Structures are given as C-alpha cells and as structure tokens.
Image: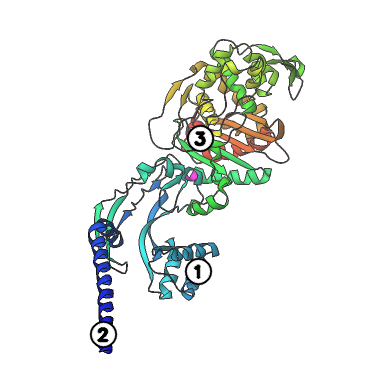
Amino acid sequence: MRRTNRKNGKDIWLLILFSVWGTLLIVRLIELQVFQHNFFSKRKITQTRTIEKIIPRRGTIFDRNGLVLAISVSSHSAFVRKELTREELKKVKEALHLTNYQVQKMVKRWREGKKFTWLKRKLSEEEYKKLKSLGIKKIEFLKEPKRVYPQGTLAAHVLGGVNIDNRGAAGIEFSLQKYIGGTPGEREILLDALGYPIDIKTLKPMVPGKDIKLTLDAKIQHVVEEALKRRIREARAKRGAVVVLNTKGEILAMSSYPFYDPNHYSETYAKNRGALRNFALSLIYPPGSTMKFIDMAIAFQLGKLRMNEKIFCENGKIRAGRKYIRDHVPFGILSVPEILIHSSNVGAIKIVRRIPRNIFYQYLLNFGFGRKTGVELPGETGGILRRPERWNSYSRDYIAIGQEIATSPLQMAAATLVIANSGEWIQPHITFKKPLRKKVLSEEVVIKVRKMMKDVVEMGTGIKANLGWIGSGGKTGTAEKIVHGKKIGYTPSFVGFIPYSHPQYVVTVVIDEPMGKYYGADVAAPLFREIGKYLLMNSNIYPAVVLQ
C-alpha cells in the first residue's frame, strides 16, 4: 500500500513538472510568434538577402593627341565567407605578401563573428594565379574595375588617382568624378543558409563614366618632367614646378616634383602624402623680380610711364618706411628698358609710386593675383594679395618688387599670358572648355613690354634663357623665403614667352629652396631655355618664324 502511494506521488510530481515546462514552452512560442515576429522576420531577411553596389567603369582619359593616360580594366578581388585555418592563412599571407597588420585585421573580424572578409582587392594577374593555385575552396573571387595609368608617373599630379572603391581621390579624377566616374548601380543578392549566393537581381543599373580628352600634350609633358627632374637634382632643391600654356590658355604641360606613380596612389597617400601635392597649383611663393614687367605694363597702360624716360635710381638704395631697399648694383640714371634689363628694385619702386594704390590693386586683380584661376583641378591656391586698406605706407614698394604678395606657378603663367596674347587675361584650362577672358592691356602697351622682356634675355639677367636669333622674352625672379620672420632659403623663378615675334607658348619655371646658387638667372632660366628649344623644334611654328 505504501509502495503504491509513493508511486502515485512520483507521477503527480512528474505531471506537475511537465505541465510547467509545457506552459513555459507555449508562452515562449507565443512571444516569438506574436510579439517578436517582426524582429525575427527582419533578421531573417538580412541573413538571406543583401544589397550590393555595382561599381561603374570609369571613363578613359586621353591627352590632346589621343594617347591613353588613364583607363579602367577588369581585375579580380579575393574574399572569404568562412574563417581560414591557421595553415590556410599562412599560405594566403605568403601568396599576397600581406603584412602582419593586415592579417591581424582579418583575424579580428572573424573573432567578432563577421563572415565576409576581403583578402585583397584589385589583384594583379600574378596574385590571382597564385591564389587560384593554392586550391583553398573557401577563397572566392569577384570581378571589379581597376584603374590603370599606362604612362606611369607622367602627369601624375594632373591625373591624381582613385581610392580602393574606384572613386576619384585627387587631380582630374577627383574634380571630374561625376563626369568620369559614372553612377553606381545596385543589386540584390539572395544567399542560402551557408551564405552562398543563389540568386542575383539588378535593382538599379549602373551608368559607366564618360571618356575625356585633356589639353595636355604627353610629349611636351615628358620632356618637361625629365628636364625638371634633372634641374632639381643639379640644384639640390626641395621641390619645383613647371607650367606650359599655349596662347589659348590651354595647359600643355604641368609638372610638379617630386613625382609619384598614380598606379600606387593609396600606398603613396599612406607613406608620403606630401608627394601628392601639385606644386604648380598649390605652391605659394613671392614672385620677386618677375613682378617688374607687370609694374611697367600697368604704368604704361595708365599713361604714367614713357618708354624714352630716364629715371634716377638713387645710386642703389631707396627708403621704404624705416628700412632701405637696395639694388644688387648701385645704379644711377637708367632708361625704362634698362630698369627691367638690370632688374632695378629702386627703378621699379619709383615707377609704381606714380600709380594710386587702389588702381594698382585693381590692376593686380585684373592680372589674376589674389584669386584662384578656376582651373579644373583641386587644391589650387588663390595666392596672397591684401586689400589696400590693409597696406601700410610702404606696402606698394614691396609689392612692386614681388614681396608682400604671393602667387602660384599657374597664376604667374596666366599673368604672363596677358603679355603673350595681346593684352587679354585668359583662364588656364586643362579640358577643352570655353575659358573666361578679360581685356587688361592695350596692344600698344603689350608690344612695348614684349620688347623689353626680349631685351632681358638678350642682354640682361635672363641671358641664360636666350634662344638665339629666334627670340623669346622673359623675366627672372629671386625671392627670399621667410617663415616666422626668419629667412629659410630662396625661390628662384623665370617666366617667359616663345617666340618673340608671335608668341605661341608661355613657360613658368619655379625652383624651391635650391642649395648653392639661388638666383633665377642661374637656376630657373637655363631650364626655360631647355624647354623652349624643344617647343620650337617640335612644333609647326619654326618654319613660320624662319619665313618672317
């Protein structure tokens, strides 16, 4: 009897236990099915469906003669959806030459429970073959467009580069991203329980980028880059830039040193970001004595100066505020052309003192100083030109000799273009667009200034830029670099046009912080001559000059 009662007691407790368990299970099912239905429905969708961007093919970039400067090609990117074993990871590291840091990032993702992991994007053909030969089934490949620059470092600072997602990151690739880059699309990928795609549906088609032709001439660009590199190394300078324009304002060459290879843009950005800077646009430097032909042009235009005048140059020094500004030689009386030929500071100052400060300022704006040119490239500086109300009593004197004002090589080239193309400022441009134009000087004034600039290279400070009987015009400049009130070096420069009789090209040369010789006449003028000889010998204007 007792045994039966015990058995019945056990049955009752088991029945109660199962009843409680069953009740809890039912409550949990109701909670999941009713109250958390939306949460788990959404979670299921994200686990089985994913939205991916379709990266468009970028447009091809050509030089003015149709040479390919940048093009998109198909490449493979490698990824995994499952964690690799230690042995598999070791093989992948060796095949792709991955760093320890890159491997650690992958391992971290797997520890965080993330399945999809890139091994490397935009593989080279050799890397792709090596990975395939490993025979690791977990490794998958995706085709992606890869940007290639077949000319290597040529015009790198103009072209710029793209990031890993194929978007423009610098240069023309960045500034014309919407035009060259196209519009990304979208696709829906349905995945199975193991994360493998079982269906792909295009939601939004991608629109490929458009091709573009630049005004650059790759042959001229190559010659300019090689010449600039040699000059920088010979002068042991920190950096330099050259700009070559034709008289339409088209940029035929734009070179900045040091160079970089846009095929390795991301690596350069990580290791030596300064090499990406386009000094032709962004280098701010005092123009020094190259300002003097502009001083004279403004004075001629306003009727404040005559070609047959004689000006007393105060035996080489003139007071400006509490200080004296001196000439490199104590000049007495000089003619107007002689002031430019010998680059007299005193003569230039005495001429500019005839011009009211507000009018002088307005003409400097007309020549393009103090504002960006608006070229279709990123990173341009507007230079430095303070408003007249911020000038002191002797600011005009210093601006006259290229101090208290700063410019860029491109800005200075555009100002020189006013003399080369009959007195009109034309916006420099790198694409074949309609540029802005502004009349600054009369034809009569331009002819006078050209003649004096020709004399500079034939018998003055620019003699090392002389191209012989064919003729050219130009002006040397040597400016001190002052940082926090301390002189740290010099920036020699040369600006000029070729040929003299009917200018076709403007060339600006700027060499920053050379060691040893530092005058524009010694450092920059010879480079102008070397580039000028090539321009004349490899263009169709040489016979026309001979016939005149």
Secondary element under disc 3, as helix, strand or loop, is loop
Residue for badge 2: 5
Which x, y percent locates residue 429?
A: 44, 34
Q: Which residues are magenta?
A: 215-219
Q: Pointer 2: residues within 10 angstroms few (<14), some, or many (20+)?
A: few
Mark 2 or mark 1: name the one nearer the start of the chain: 2
**From what the image shows, is residue 268 above or below residue 447?**
below
Looking at the image, do the residues carrying marks 3 and 1 touch, with CB atoms under 8 Å apart?
no
**Residue 216 lies in the magenta stretch:** yes
Q: Amino acid at mark 2?
A: Asn
Observer-nearest of 167 and 535: 167
Residue beneath the point at 54% across and 11% down: 302
Q: Nearer the viewer, mark 2 or mark 1?
A: 2
Mark 3 or mark 1: name the one nearer the start of the chain: 1
- Image quarter hosting the N terminus: bottom left
Observer-nearest of 160 and 77: 77
Q: Pointer 3: residues within 10 angstroms few (<14), some, or many (20+)?
A: many
Q: CA distance from mark 3 to mark 1?
A: 41 Å
Looking at the image, do the residues carrying marks 2 and 1 touch, with CB atoms under 8 Å apart?
no
Residue beneath the point at 37% across and 74% down: 137
**From what the image shows, is residue 65 above or below residue 122?**
above
Residue 530 appears in the rendering: yes
Q: CA distance from mark 2 to mark 1?
A: 72 Å
Residue for badge 1: 93
Residue 85 horizontal side relative to residue 494, left or right: left
Which x, y percent locates residue 299?
A: 58, 14
**From what the image shows, is residue 330 above or below residue 514?**
above
**From what the image shows, is residue 146 above or below residue 520?**
below
Secondary element under disc 1, as helix, strand or loop, is helix
Residue beneath the point at 60% across and 36% down: 510
Residue for badge 3: 380
**Residue 530 lies in the magenta stretch:** no
